[in-house]
Amino acid sequence: MNSALTKALAKLLDPSLAAGNRTIMVGHEAQHFGWAVQDRVGVITLNRPERKNPLTFAS
């Protein structure tokens, strides 16, 4: 995708993100998931085995 198209889609989907309104959470350690980026691929690992790793906290 080209840069102009990416920016246009971002504005349509979530204007606050397109405006650069982001929160940087330095030092934040998530309790229920882990994440890593390797070779431009993001990997999210769920870590709630007692709940069978649901995608919602209501589970």
Image (cartoon, rainbow, N blue to C red):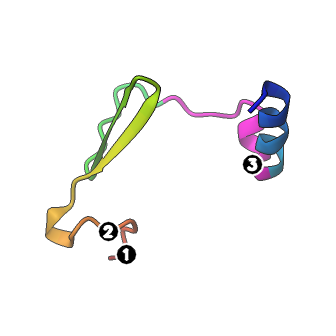
Q: Residue furthest bottom?
A: 59
Displayed quadrant of residue 15: top right
The amino acid on which the numbered mark 2 sits, given as a three-letter code, is Pro
Type of amino acid under label 1: Ala
Which structural element holds mark 1? loop
When the figure is inspected, residue 12 is found, relative to residue 56, above or below; the finding is above
Q: Are marks 1 and 2 in contact (CB under 8 Å)?
A: yes
Q: Residue 18: give x, y in percent of width and height.
A: 77, 36
Q: Which mark is residue 58?
A: 1
Q: Is residue 35 magenta?
A: no
Nearest the viewer among 44 and 28 is 44
Q: CA distance from mark 1 to mark 2?
A: 9 Å
Q: Which residue is mark 2?
A: 54
Task: Point out the stretch of residues depicted in magenta.
Answer: 13-24
Residue that carries the numbered disc 3 in the rendered image: 14
Q: Position of residue 42 (x, y in %)?
A: 42, 36
Residue nearest the observer in this picture, 46 or 38: 38
Seen at 21% across and 71% down, the residue is 51
Of labels 1 and 2, the one closer to you: 2
First in sequence: mark 1 or mark 3? 3
**CA neighbours of label 2 inside 10 A, class few (<14), some (14 to 19), many (20+):** few
Which element type, helix, strand or loop, lies under badge 3?
Answer: loop
Q: Is residue 7 left or right of residue 28?
A: right
